[in-house]
Amino acid sequence: MSRHQEAVAIMPRRQRCAIYTRKSSEEGLDMEFNSLDAQRESCESYVASQRSEGFAAIRERYDDGGHSGGTLERPALQRLLADVEAGLIDVIVVYKIDRLSRSLMDFAKLVEIFDRNQVTFVSVTQSFNTTTSMGRLTLNILLSFAQFEREVIGERIRDKIAASRKRGMWMGGFVPLGYRVENRKLLIDESEAATVRMIFERFVTIGSATVMAKTLAAEGVRTRRSKPIDKGFLYKLLNNRVYIGEAVHKGTSYPGEHKPIVERALWDKVHTILQTSPRQRAASTRAQTPALLKGLIFTDTGTAMTPTATKKCSKLYRYYTSMDLIRNRAVDAAGPQRLPAGMVEDAVIGEIRRVIAAPEVRARALSALKADMPDVDDKVVIAALDEFDKLWVSLFPAEQARIVQLLVARVTVGAAGIAIDLRNGGIGSLARQMMAPQTRKDAA
């Protein structure tokens, strides 16, 4: 019995070993036996050689493929640290210390976590003991060289990129709309290039990225990834000097090896507009935007509602406000006396679209047209009305206001909601105007 007790007493305590592996790039990770597997095999062999010391590898894998050692924000490393804090690990085994971190400051943080949880650290190819002062000195020296190596590699890559950019070479990254990459060179994709030229040309006419983004979204124009084109995308595209055949590095432009998509004259016109501050351009757009329902909107008591606006934090808010409220007159009606302009205008435009799409309304409009134009083609009229949605988003605000005045007789706002009265023959007049360009084209 005493012999058995003595044998148990000298058995080493079981050391739960977690193997951590890392590779900076994703290249080769799809191979059957990759760098992470090689690191793990070496670490497992080391753990097996230390079985007499009680070392035993746990089943959990901590592999970070495609993650840099310059940061601690790595999924497998974060799981490893969580298990360390939970007391599930006694020893961390890595192939080299730079697999765990290449940053001296980050490694100091890791060592602090390990010490707090009584966890030791082993590098298979670099033998040292972190529990002694000499071991810590050795660790700091090795980490300093690892960080130095990382910084030298970074400088070398940056120098190479800078030299290549100065020669106008494409150095990878996101491929701009309008180009494709072949043999590490930018080549023009004609179908996308046509979209790029269209955006530059239309911006010269419209002058507002906000309005243009809405127009392109309504027309179904999308990015290469099938996402709607927003204002941010437009600004990036319009400021990308790749389109005039230049390569840019750290704010300096160099003649590129690739061919331009946009002519310099068109580029200069766009940037003359962009040099005006967005606030001034927005103010100009608002000044040119007439209220769509001016002179058409009334309360249910017959009081006119007039366009008003307030400014808050550099943002303009538009309303339709009854004259009773403006002149501080007694208000008998239960309905709203002030409404957001955008909400009312959207409701009116939505009703116009619904009415134009109604078959019975189209039939009446067609009959009215035939009274004046007996030879009119039914299909041409219907096709013209079908194009209303596309036409609307492409019109300038003044033209949109003119069409609303043509179609709407009165808008009444009351407690029960909004009532919209359309003009008799308005849709027929609209169809006649929409057919005019096509008629001139056929005649030519």
Image (cartoon, helix red, strand yellow):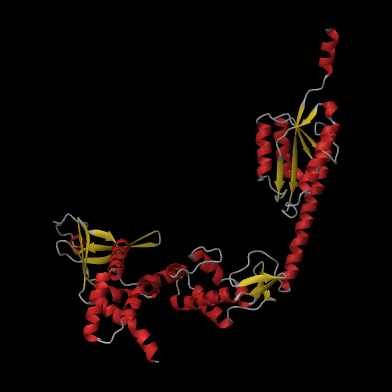
Q: In terms of depth relative to the viewer, which is nearer, 213 or 115?
A: 213
Q: Is residue 64 placed above or below 268 in the rendered structure? A: above
How many marks the image carries: the answer is: 0
- Residue 103 visible to the viewer: no
Q: Which residue lies furthest to the bottom in this view?
A: 444
Q: In the picture provided, is 217 more to the left or to the right than 361?
A: right
Answer with the quarter of the image where residue 14 lies. Answer: top right
Residue 141: percent from the left, percent from the top?
83, 43
Answer with the quarter of the image where residue 158 lies. Answer: bottom right
Q: Residue furthest top?
A: 1
Q: In the picture provided, is 381 more to the left or to the right than 139?
A: left
**For the point 70% across and 67% down, which residue is it?**
171
**For the point 69% across and 65% down, which residue is it?**
172
Residue 113: percent from the left, percent from the top?
70, 34
**For the point 40% across and 62% down, which residue is it?**
314
- Residue 26 visible to the viewer: yes
Residue 341: percent from the left, percent from the top?
30, 63
Q: Is residue 98 placed above or below 246 in the rendered structure? A: above
Residue 212: percent from the left, percent from the top?
45, 71
Answer with the quarter of the image where residue 42 lies. Answer: top right
Q: In terms of depth relative to the viewer, which is nearer, 414 or 385?
A: 385
Q: In the picture provided, is 123 more to the left or to the right than 403?
A: right
**For the point 18% across and 59% down, which residue is it?**
328
Q: In terms of depth relative to the viewer, which is nearer, 150 or 49?
A: 49
Q: In terms of depth relative to the viewer, which is nearer, 238 or 58?
A: 58
